[in-house]
Amino acid sequence: MSANNGEQMLNTAKEIIGSTCQSLGIEQDVIDRIIEPDSIHEVTLDLERDNGRITPIKAFRIQHNNLLGPYKGGIRFHETVNRSEVQALATLMSIKTAVVNLPFGGGKGGVVINPKTLSQGELRRLSQNYVAKLANVIGEDIDVPAPDVNTNPTIMKWMLAEYEKIIGRKSPATFTGKPVTNGGSLGRMEATGRGGVFVLQELLKRLNGGNQSKMTIAVQGFGNVGYYFALIASQLGHRIIAISDSKGAILVENDNDSFDLNAVQNCKKELATVTQCYCVNGVCDSKRGKKISNEDLLELPVDILVPAALENVINTENMSKIKAKIIIEMANGPVSAKANEYLKRNGVLIVPDVLANAGGVIVSYLEWVQGKQRYWWTEEKVNLELEKIIVAAFSDVWTHGKEKNISLTESAFQVAVQRIVAAL
Ligand code: NAD
């Protein structure tokens, strides 16, 4: 994201928190305190190249707010990452952890690098150096990082090992998103998609008076979040009738069909794109199925649209063509602010990202709890705890929204801000 886009993202985050506070009658000095980050750590890393030379690399850790508990948020590696973007993301983490009532605040990290240009050794040394430069401001009760764009469980394992070397003792709860063999939690991989499906089921209960009807669903993005959302929703009987990745989208041929997600996933692993993979009932046939564009997928007449890829994909250009009556924001920020307003006026129900995709941070919290106790749970236990937390959060947001006659997005921000302000 360019510096301008980062700036824009930060302004949007500040505006939405500001207007939420105003609608709650919160005074300006309190609003300013809620918006401003606690600390901004900007450091220069020493990237030791394979040839022994050192390249300076800019990096950040921004700690937005720890009123509810240690700062929590991922570290992204990207060549365009910038301070405003990291600050915006840290701010939104404070909201997300508060919406789902976790004992965490919000933080975010960034390293200005394209990791694909590095050798494995360089990537490892850079990850270790990030920790070496910031070890004094992180820790299991201070600030708990996790993976984000272009970082993964292996990088968390390297970072934790470096941190433990520096402090001279074990501290598995300092990083989450670790491999299961290194203190990670079972269920973390599926957590964001699974959490989104719990939210969907709760929503349908409220809308249909407990009658869990089967919905038609289009999912944009067939990565970690989109795949598990689609898979788990289809296991509950919903029909996934369109899916896409960066190369394009496919729609079922027959109106009554539903994609076989396991088969599509296996096929995609082989052929690298879902558009080659028309898989229904365990049979894959690349000649069948309708190939459509990513734009077409968003405009399909489905019951539920699930953007699970990129931000801003539903915007002023296509908002009038959206036909779904429910949008579950599984990506971060997939619906622009203007499109959100327009769709709300037109009766579209949008479940906001800070609630819908919070399953990941919830299971990160459960990993932290397990790490602190040095006692690791079964996957069933993790999934049950995830369900309890996200269902309670949905219920809070739904009830508050009904009481105040506001959208779920407005309600989620109000619930979060009230919790943060109450802790002041
Ligand atoms: P991922 O990289 O695993 O998957 C992204 C998918 O989107 C890929 O299949 C890619 O091909 C597809 N894609 C890219 N451009 C596209 C386009 N123009 N049209 C359709 N598909 C496109 O990423 P992920 O972890 O699944 O994350 C997806 C979104 O969810 C991101 O916005 C991320 O910030 C958000 N999110 C992820 C998590 C998590 O736990 N992974 C948690 C919260 C939020």
Image (cartoon, grey):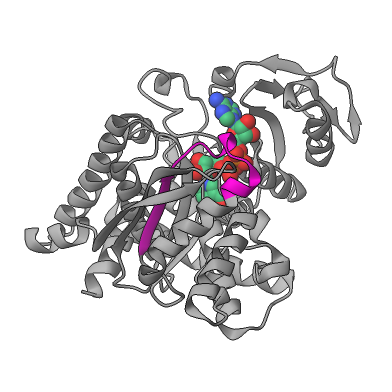
Quadrant of the snapshot with the N terminus:
top left
Quarter of the image for residue 350 reads top left
Q: Residue furthest left?
A: 28
Report ligand 1 position as a quadrant: top right
Is the residue 363 above or below the residue 52 in the image? below
Quarter of the image for residue 414 reads bottom left
Tally of numbered discs: 0
Camera-nearest residue between 288 and 60: 60
Residue displayed at 71% across by 22% down: 250
Is the residue 161 above or below the residue 116 in the image? below
In the rendered view, does 104 fall on the left or right side of 369? left
Q: Is residue 196 visible?
A: no
Residue 302, position in %: x, y? Answer: 60, 29
Quadrant of the snapshot with the C terminus:
bottom left
Query: Which region shows up in magenta?
Result: 106-123
Is the residue 389 above or below the residue 155 in the image? below
Camera-nearest residue between 351 and 379: 379
Residue displayed at 37% across by 74% down: 69
